[in-house]
Structure formats: structure tokens, C-alpha cells
Amino acid sequence: MSATGDEISTRQDAVEKLLLQAEIADFLYREADLLDERRYSEWLGLLTEDYEYSVPLRTNVAYDDLAQLEQTQQGSDICWFDEGKETVALRVEQLMTGLHWAEEPVSRVSHLVTNVRIEAVEDAEVEVSCRFLVYRNRVTDETDFLVGRRRDRLRRSVAGDWQLCRRRLLLDQAVLLAKNLSIIL
């Protein structure tokens, strides 16, 4: 029994979707490695010029208010971070000077990314959701675990490479348990 044209088309679509999923996941894993290895200049090269980065505050609210009040809003409320590529580049520049008091001695960091899902594909852009865990160890006994979910928008460049044009992180804690956020999440 042979496959019909519709079945072949459906399989081809599924294969293309899987290939795109693998390509996006590989990009995110490579990006995490660049951050862990402190290869910040290379990491900045993955960001588009119009890159947006936000980490809103989480609040404890009643169940009925979750949708509207559980997190602050980018652009109108206070956030842990609400910045563009220029500001991120300045933070990276400061980290690379070796004179960043909050990073002396330098933190040992591991970024773990999982549950990568493609939520939408529009022209040359892909909306991606994932979960993350950032582990940080400083000095001898300072340890932080930053866990949450992330929503990224990636754009395919003219050269065919993926670049990050927007990142929104939601930390799964209402009170920051780390001493600072001096690392790139």
C-alpha cells in the first residue's frame, strides 16, 4: 500500500518541523555555552541590533489576579531588567574589564535549557518557549539557582544564521534569593 500525496506532505511538514526544532534547540544550547565560557563578544554577535531583554518582577497574588498582576509589565513597571542591546553590551563590557566588584572573584556559571518548543513561525522569525536553570557558584560556598521560563524570538539573518531579537525571562521566585544579578541570565 502506498502513501497518498496528503500523507507524504504531512510527513514532510513533520520532518521540516523537527529539523527546525533541532536547529533552534542547538542555537540555544550553543548560546548557553558561550555564556558559561565567558565568550561574551561572541555572544553579543548573536543579538540583533533591535534586541529587547526583559526580566519582570513576580508577585504573590490571589488566583483570580494571576493573569494580570503576577508579573510586572515591560515598559511601564519596574523590572529586574528592561533593556536593549546597547545596555546589555555595556554590562558585558563591564564584566570583561575584570573590575566588576560583584564578580570578583568571577562566578562559575552553568546555563541549562530544556523543554524547547516552537510556538509560532512568521516569515524569518520564530517564537520559542523554554525552561531554564542557571546555576552560579561564587567563592567557596555561595550558590544560587535561578529557575524559570523563557520566551525568545529568533530571527534568521540574511546570511542564514539565527539571531536573538527578544528575550523575556520569568523567574520562578517572587523574592530574589541571590545576592545580585550580575551574570547574564
Image (spheres, helix red, strand yellow):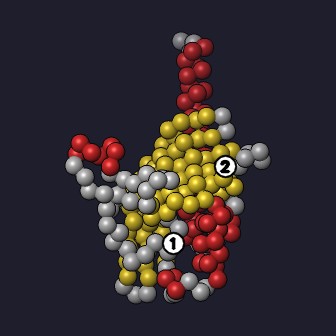
Vertical position of residue 8 compared to residue 180: above or below? above
As displayed, is residue 179 above or below residue 79?
below
Q: Quadrant of residue 134?
A: bottom left
Residue 145 vs 19, above or below: the answer is below
Residue at (68% x, 69% y) in the render: 41
Please tell me how crowded label 2 is: few (under 14), some (14-19), or many (20+) other residues with Cα within 10 Å.
Answer: many
Per the rendering, the mark at residue 90 is none
Identified at 50% across, 74% down, the residue is 182
Q: What's the CA distance linking mark 2 and mark 1?
A: 23 Å
Residue farthest along the right direction in this orientation: 159
Instruction: Examine the image and state in which quarter residue 59 appears.
Output: bottom left
Give the mark, 2 or 1, whose residue is nearer the N terminus.
2
Image point (35%, 69%), residue name: 176
- The three-letter amino acid code for the residue at tag 1 is Ile
User: Which residue is farthest front?
Assistant: 76
* Tag 2 near tag 1, CB within 8 Å: no
x, y percent for residue 82 = 52, 59
Foreground of the two, 14 or 167: 167
Q: Position of residue 105 (x, y in %)?
A: 51, 87
From where the camera sits, is residue 114 visible?
no
Residue 163 location in percent, x, y?
66, 52
Give the structural element (helix, strand or loop) at label 1: loop
Residue depicted at x 44% and y 61% = 79
Q: Is residue 128 above or below residue 81?
A: above
- Residue 180 visible from this viewpoint: yes
Residue that mark 1 sits on: 183
Amino acid type, label 2: Trp
Badge 2 marks a residue whose secondary structure is strand
Q: Which label number is shown at residue 162?
A: 2
Q: State the image coordinates of residue 61 (x, y, percent, origin top left).
A: 25, 52
